[in-house]
Amino acid sequence: MYDGSGLPGLTTAAEILPPDPDCFFLRHRRPQPAFCDAVLGITGYAERKKGHFRQIEAASLAVPLIFSFSSSFAIALGRVPEQHERFGCFTSGLFAGPAIIDSRGESACVQVDFTPTGAHRFFGVPMSELAARMIPLDDILGLSAHRLRDRLEEEPNWERRLDLVETLVYRRLLEQPPSDRQAATAIGHIAASQGTVSITTIAAELDCSRKHLNEIFRRNVGIAPKTYARMVRFHHVRRLAMTGQRSWADIAQECGFSDQAHMSRDFLEFCGETPSGWKRRCADRR
């Protein structure tokens, strides 16, 4: 599932390794049980040391909502950001590639990680409108985002900061209709198969055409079901690589790739680097 370790819209540079506590402050809160289908977690984040920090996130399976109340972040999807590409409070839909974020040691924010269907409920727009885009919150939440940002800046206590964001998120979710059952069922099939189930099989399970299934995903997830399944499989590859001594060839076979080269191409597309390069970087951070 989504690798949300609490950095601003991104995970740590090695994705699944914790950040250096001397440089970063993190305070994570699990979602309340009634909202687990929509929210993956809420995290407070602050930088403790000045310097240039570059964090890389591989293609994520969740939609982040960021309330920044300090220095903004330079962020770009699929490439290194320019310094003018700065965002404070923002969201970004699913993107089939890596995101890169630069900060200077002065950033602080609260991040909410949504499931795609949870983000659809919260924002109330087709997720295709958010996919592969960086969107300032003022453009989608209006003045409520600006007011909350000011309250977070004024509030010194991190638990109360998380309370403020949690209250806004849960209240808004309660005002919205439940998630689309067909979308939830399709996502469940993909997750259960670790991304290997065929799209034709899912359409048959839902008794709908592939065209209709694509429309369900466009509205509720933001990307095509095949792309989403490939991203789920990619995340499974990374988990296997970090939790055992399997060779890359064995992992490729276990995850249903035609060969190791096929797996490496997907890995490079979603992560921005080769499997061996990513594994070395993870080891360097231990």
Image: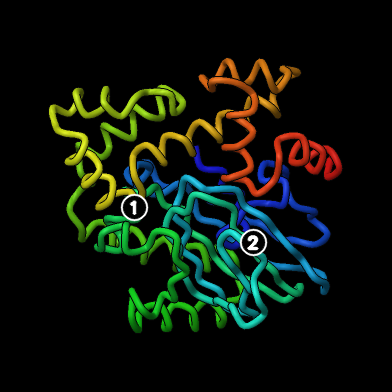
Pointer 1 local density, CA inside 10 Å: few below 14, some 14–19, many at least 20: many
Image quadrant for the C terminus?
top right
Name the one closer to the observer, 72 or 160.
Answer: 72
Pointer 2 local density, CA inside 10 Å: few below 14, some 14–19, many at least 20: many
Q: Position of residue 170 (x, y in %)?
A: 33, 58
Label number found at residue 155: none
Q: Position of residue 85 (x, y in %)?
A: 59, 78
Q: Position of residue 137 (x, y in %)?
A: 41, 75
Residue drawn at x 34%, y 39% is 225
Compared with 168, 1 (above or below) is above
Residue drawn at x 41%, y 52% is 114
Secondary structure state at the residue bearing disc 1: loop
Name the one closer to the observer, 229 or 265.
Answer: 265
How far is mark 1 from mark 2, CA to CA? 20 Å
Residue type at the position of mark 1:
Gly
Compared with 117, 137 (above or below) is below
On screen, residue 278 versus residue 231, left or right, reads right
Name the one closer to the observer, 6 or 272.
Answer: 272
Identify the residue position indicated by label 1 in the image: 222
Identify the residue position indicated by label 2 in the image: 100
Instruction: Single out the residue that lies furthest toward the left.
Output: 207
On screen, residue 134 versus residue 267, left or right, reads left
